[in-house]
Image: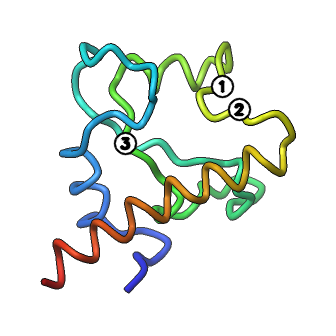
Amino acid sequence: MTPQRTDKSYLNWLKKQPCSNPDCKGNGGQMIPAHQRILGNGGMGLKSPDRDALPLCFTCHSVEHRGSITFWAQGSKAATKKYVQEICNYHLERYRCEKYS
């Protein structure tokens, strides 16, 4: 089962997961679900659905919002989008396994 556009249960679960930034030093504080707009499932004035969120610590989330670093960059935009989708799918699968087992 995939979370709906908004799914508080999934977002709360993400807050308990480790930071998704592979370069995170682990001292960034509270986890925050970071909605990944690169996947293109948002829209004008519409946040991306919760299924497109990844856990980031407060520090990494702030850096990502400033746009000063792209954690997920894989060269081309298409490759980056595919990589981010894979990370989202990984979290969704883990969530389903824990919730429905």
Residue at the image point whose x is 40% and y is 75% from the top: 3
Q: Position of residue 71 (x, y in %)?
A: 59, 27
Q: Is residue 32 above or below residue 60?
A: below
Q: Is residue 6 above or below residue 68?
A: below
How far apart marks 2 and 3 lie (CA) works out to: 17 Å
Q: Nearer the viewer, residue 50 or 76?
A: 76
Asked if the residue at tag 2 contacts the one at tag 1, i.e. Cβ–Cβ closer than 8 Å, the answer is: yes
How far apart marks 1 and 3 lie (CA) works out to: 15 Å
Q: Position of residue 6 (x, y in %)?
A: 42, 68
In the picture of the structure, the residue carrying the numbered disc 1 is 70
Q: Where residue 73 is drawn, which disc sits there?
A: 2
Q: Where residue 37 is drawn, which disc sits there?
A: none
Q: Quadrant of residue 69?
A: top right
Q: Quadrant of the N terminus?
A: bottom left
Q: Position of residue 93 (x, y in %)?
A: 36, 71
Who comes first in sequence, dot 1 or dot 3?
A: 3
Q: Nearer the viewer, residue 72 or 56?
A: 72
